Image (cartoon, coloured by chain):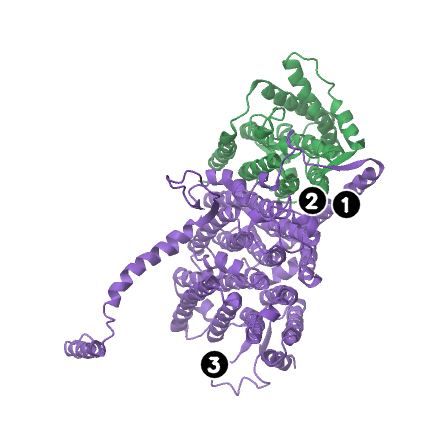
Chain colours: A purple, B green
């Protein structure tokens, strides 16, 4: 029954191409709501009953009819899929609600087909994300993986009239296909050894073969999607250019599917744990350090968030690597808490990052820019946007009482437990991780105070043509829902811990008996209580302050200027000046490009000039730009063979045939 | 509970003690030690002026910063007497609470659109990012040494091995002391009494706060002293002493700490601003050295 409904909903979504332009939105909303309802029921059913749900996505036909084809669309929902399904549903419905307000402006300017394509791709992306969490079969997985890449490509290229947008979208598509090839190779290798297509082959393969090479291939393939450095370069380009609801979905969910892929492979690992953990650790630490520094240095609000997303993916992989280390060095606390923190971080990050992207979309819609140097003073004009931006920003910086802190705390707890009991190597590794996590925590506060403080606070740096007010309600509703969830998860993390404990049972390498880690529920009750005290005390003190301020005189005056009263908005700190001290310290990582025209010597009375600073991603330069330059140098030599004359082209096959004859004659082939 | 009350009392006397020490050393008579209580009370009753540029963030920042410190106190034990809240990893919770307070004070400084306060805000976040590893490294060392991961157990188990403990305690106390000076923006990282806003870190951030909010901020700064001071006290006071002596020792050590800060402020110049990051990283470096020594001592190699 539910399967039929599922299929009908997908079929109905095709109506979007025929519906009148005002109704197109609802032609997508209704099927999506239906699917959200069905899948949420499945997920909750799995979570409540602790049973893996298996179903067949075919028209009420049993497996036998399709028996000749091994790839019957079979879905398998375990605990971890169930949690992911719930996450995808929450973020997607938020993004879709947002899209209603955001796309209104485009309804008159875009063609009907363009709008339909956008909605339909959004729907396809949602469906493929959902199914990717449930599918184990290799062919279908790769098919859906491709569908996900293509639909997100169409979504990114929404403003495809601009050449820059097209370039970014194609860049994205190419990178995704490199990842796809690696995944294909991974599945092929596993298939050749075991004869099974898909993730089910992995436990069998890993039990009889060395684990590191295959894991590494899969890891690279998924890392492109997850955006781990140095495969991150698509994210800071695509996230700013896509519409905000698409960025929210991509940053919030799509990269997590990459993480889920890595986890799915890691689940079946059998040996060489410490090698694999070291590879993961190296990648994630480099990712964390580079991306958070870049994020501090960035002036584009959404690029800043994109880099911070990359950092968070680094944290997720760090948790996984710690967990594998814990297994390798027989420290169950680290093994359990690492993966617990990692999974919890997937959910918390998707909540706050999608909210931040949506709210940045509000800012961009109203001011027409996302350059921090041109914003400022928005908090007084659009207080609701500012307030929710602040809440999600606090969560992003992993500060109590929000959910972002819970996941970091879980990892810290595991690390310190490992330090207190572990041996030499684990102590060294753990303290390295502590240093990196602590610095990245500090720097994410740096980045977020910059993003929030310079763009929402202070005074306005530029005049805007339109009035600055909070956008319509539909563009704020997702932020409200997500913020409530963030606070709930932050205050009562222990409520969903048992579910995550169930989920991590799928990680076969974990110690069999981790039941005594249920004592953590006790820790997190105190933890939640303390966070609650923090909130309650804040309210009490604020109430006292309110009462006191009613009794006395409260005046408004100019900002104190050290005796100087001509202060203007230009005297404020800019994005660049705010990050200069850090740049001095991190000069090997950060580099800048100055955009200005030099004064020629003969110009005696120079006119007005502009000076602008852009950040340069060094890792991108060395990992992509320079190799491509090298390739471009080689390719013309290959092109020598391409003469354009049909006579030449006929010679090639003749030469090839002669070669084959000769080689057969001499028994080479 | 006892730690909570003692820290509150000490906090109220901290600024007065430091000022008194500085006054005596420079040949002045100086205010009374409990002068700070009157000052704070006066500020709480006063009216306020808010910048016309400021928004709601400015209104809530001082309150949240203050509450963060109060909540942090709940986590601090008293030399063997358990704290109100204790769980594994509570020191991480404490350091992140301070991070929340810092976040709020920094955004409040950016809220008034003043170049001065932006300067202070900028330095504050940078120094905090560099300083945070020092504390966690120190706690990591104590975790290795005692085998526990919460304040209560760490401080109780510290004295199990008397001879080794003395080494750890002395170096940890030095690291914590250096940490306090930077965290509270005192000499040598920052001079609260300098005549020029351009060279300040913390004081320049609060230029536009007045009345109730300023009172809260002053109280928060005093609490910060007392919180970290009490951590040093927890390190040095053996947990098996009778409670009366422990309270006495606690007050004496806190007083000595305040006097020591006064001494340093009287005799030491402030660092050049550009040298501060180096200075702060060196604190983490000392903590890292202690950590490595601890790995060797504990025969982990």
Q: For this rendering, which residue is in front, A517 or A54?
A: A54
Give the residue furthest to the bottom.
Answer: A65
Using residue A515 as the reference point, say whether residue A627 is left or right of it. Answer: left
Q: Are marks 3 and 2 on the same chain?
A: no
Q: Quadrant of residue A220?
A: bottom left
Q: Residue at x 69, y 61 (%)?
A: A472
Residue on which the image places disc 2? B57
Disc 3 crowd rating (10 Å Cα; few below 14, some 14-19, many 20+) is few
Q: Are marks 3 and 1 on the same chain?
A: yes
Q: Quadrant of residue A560?
A: top right
Q: What is the secondary structure assignment of the residue under circle 3?
A: loop
Q: Is residue A539 above or below residue A305?
A: above
- Single out the mark in the foreground, 3 or 2: 2
Please identify the quadrant where the C terminus of chain B is shown. top left
Residue on which the image places disc 1? A539
Whole-percent x, y for residue A245 in the image: 59, 63
Q: For this rendering, which residue is in front, A669 or B38?
A: B38
Q: What is the secondary structure assignment of the residue under circle 1?
A: helix
Q: What is the secondary structure assignment of the residue under circle 2?
A: helix
Give the residue furthest to the top.
Answer: B27
Using residue A56 as the reference point, say whether residue A40 is left or right of it. Answer: right
Residue on which the image places disc 3? A70
Q: Chain of mark 3?
A: A
Q: Residue at x 65, y 49 (%)?
A: A378
Whole-percent x, y for residue A513 in the image: 58, 58
Q: Chain of mark 2?
A: B
Q: For this rendering, which residue is in front, B299 or A253?
A: A253
């Amino acid at each position: 029954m539910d399967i039929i409904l599922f299929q009908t909903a997908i079929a109905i979504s095709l109506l979007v191409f025929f519906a009148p332009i005002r109704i197109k939105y609802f032609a997508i909303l209704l099927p999506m709501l239906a699917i959200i309802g069905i899948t949420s029921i499945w997920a909750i059913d799995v979570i409540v009953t602790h049973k893996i749900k298996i179903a067949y996505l075919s028209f009420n036909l049993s497996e036998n009819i399709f028996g000749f084809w091994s790839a019957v669309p079979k879905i398998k929902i375990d605990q971890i899929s169930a949690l992911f399904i719930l996450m995808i549903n929450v973020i997607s419905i938020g993004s879709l609600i947002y899209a209603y307000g955001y796309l209104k402006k485009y309804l008159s300017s875009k063609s009907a087909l363009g709008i339909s394509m956008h909605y339909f791709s959004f729907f396809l992306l949602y469906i493929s994300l959902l199914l990717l969490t449930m599918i184990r079969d290799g062919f279908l997985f790769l098919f859906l993986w491709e569908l996900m890449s293509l639909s997100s490509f169409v979504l990114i290229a929404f403003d495809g009239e601009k050449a820059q947008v097209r370039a970014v979208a194609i860049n994205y598509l190419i990178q995704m296909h490199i990842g796809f090839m690696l995944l294909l190779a991974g599945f092929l290798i596993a298939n050749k050894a075991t004869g099974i297509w898909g993730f089910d082959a992995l436990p069998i393969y890993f039990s009889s073969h060395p684990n590191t090479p295959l894991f590494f291939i899969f890891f690279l393939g998924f890392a492109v999607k997850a955006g781990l450095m140095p495969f991150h370069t698509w994210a800071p380009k695509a996230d700013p250019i896509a519409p905000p609801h698409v960025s929210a979905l991509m940053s919030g969910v799509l990269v997590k599917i990459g993480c889920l892929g890595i986890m799915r492979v890691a689940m079946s690992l059998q040996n060489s744990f410490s090698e694999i953990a070291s590879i993961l650790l190296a990648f994630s630490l480099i990712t964390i350090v580079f991306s958070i520094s870049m994020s501090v240095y960035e002036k584009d609000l959404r690029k800043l968030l994109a880099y911070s997303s990359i950092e968070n993916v680094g944290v997720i992989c760090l948790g996984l690597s710690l967990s594998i280390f814990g297994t390798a060095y027989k420290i169950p606390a680290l093994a359990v808490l690492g993966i617990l923190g990692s999974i919890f971080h997937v959910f918390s990050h998707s909540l706050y990052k999608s909210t931040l992207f949506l709210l940045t979309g509000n800012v961009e819609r109203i001011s027409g820019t996302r350059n921090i140097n041109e914003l400022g003073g928005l908090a007084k004009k659009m207080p609701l946007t500012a307030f929710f931006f602040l809440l999600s920003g606090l969560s992003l910086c992993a500060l109590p009482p929000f959910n972002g802190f819970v996941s970091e705390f879980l990892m810290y707890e595991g690390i310190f437990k490992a330090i207190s009991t572990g041996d030499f190597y684990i102590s060294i590794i753990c303290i390295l991780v502590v240093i990196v996590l602590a610095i990245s925590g500090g720097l994410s506060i740096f980045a977020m105070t910059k993003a929030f403080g310079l763009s929402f606070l202070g005074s306005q740096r530029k005049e805007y043509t339109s009035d600055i007010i909070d956008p319509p309600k539909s563009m704020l509703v997702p932020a409200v829902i997500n913020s409530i969830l963030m606070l709930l998860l932050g205050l009562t993390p222990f409520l969903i811990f048992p579910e995550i404990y169930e989920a991590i049972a799928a990680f076969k390498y974990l110690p069999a008996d981790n039941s005594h880690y249920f004592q953590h529920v006790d820790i997190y009750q105190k933890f939640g209580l303390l966070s609650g005290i923090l909130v309650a005390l804040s309210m009490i003190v604020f109430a006292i302050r309110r009462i006191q301020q009613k009794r006395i005189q409260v005046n408004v005056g100019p900002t104190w200027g050290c005796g100087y009263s001509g202060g203007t908005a230009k005297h404020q700190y800019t994005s660049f000046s705010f990050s200069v001290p850090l740049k001095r310290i991190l000069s090997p990582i950060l580099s800048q490009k100055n955009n200005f025209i030099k004064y020629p010597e003969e110009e005696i009375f120079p006119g007005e000039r502009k000076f602008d600073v852009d950040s340069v991603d060094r890792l991108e330069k060395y990992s992509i730009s320079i190799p491509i330059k090298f390739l471009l140098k080689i390719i013309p030599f290959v092109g020598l063979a391409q003469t354009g004359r049909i006579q030449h082209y006929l010679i090639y096959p003749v030469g090839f045939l002669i070669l084959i004859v000769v080689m057969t004659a001499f028994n080479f082939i | 509970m006892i730690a909570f009350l003692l820290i509150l009392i000490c906090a109220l006397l901290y600024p007065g003690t430091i000022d008194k020490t500085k006054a005596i050393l420079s040949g002045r008579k100086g205010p009374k030690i409990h002068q700070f209580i009157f000052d704070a009370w006066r500020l709480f009753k006063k009216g306020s002026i808010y910048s016309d540029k400021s928004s709601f963030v400015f209104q809530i920042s001082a309150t949240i910063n203050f509450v963060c410190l109060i909540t942090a106190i709940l986590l601090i034990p008293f030399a063997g007497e358990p704290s109100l809240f204790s769980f594994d990893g509570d020191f991480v919770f404490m350091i992140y609470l301070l991070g929340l307070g810092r976040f709020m004070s920094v955004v409040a400084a950016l809220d008034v659109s003043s170049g001065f306060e932006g300067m202070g805000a900028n330095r504050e976040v940078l120094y905090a990012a560099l300083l945070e590893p020092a504390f966690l490294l120190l706690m990591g060392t104590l975790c290795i040494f005692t085998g526990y991961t919460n304040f209560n157990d760490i401080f109780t188990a510290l004295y199990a091995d008397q001879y080794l403990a003395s080494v750890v305690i002395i170096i940890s106390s030095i690291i914590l002391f250096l940490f306090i000076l930077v965290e509270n923006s005192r000499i040598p990282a920052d001079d609260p009494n300098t005549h020029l806003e351009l060279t300040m870190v913390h004081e320049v951030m609060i230029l536009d706060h007045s009345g109730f909010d300023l009172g809260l901020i002053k109280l928060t700064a005093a609490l910060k002293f007392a919180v970290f001071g009490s951590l040093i006290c927890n390190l040095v006071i053996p947990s098996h002493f009778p409670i009366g002596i422990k309270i006495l020792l606690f007050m004496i050590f806190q007083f000595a700490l305040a006097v020591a800060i006064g001494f340093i402020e009287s005799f030491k110049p402030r660092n050049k601003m550009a040298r501060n990051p180096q200075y702060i990283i060196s604190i983490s470096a000392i903590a890292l050295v202690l950590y490595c020594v601890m790995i060797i001592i504990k025969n982990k190699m």
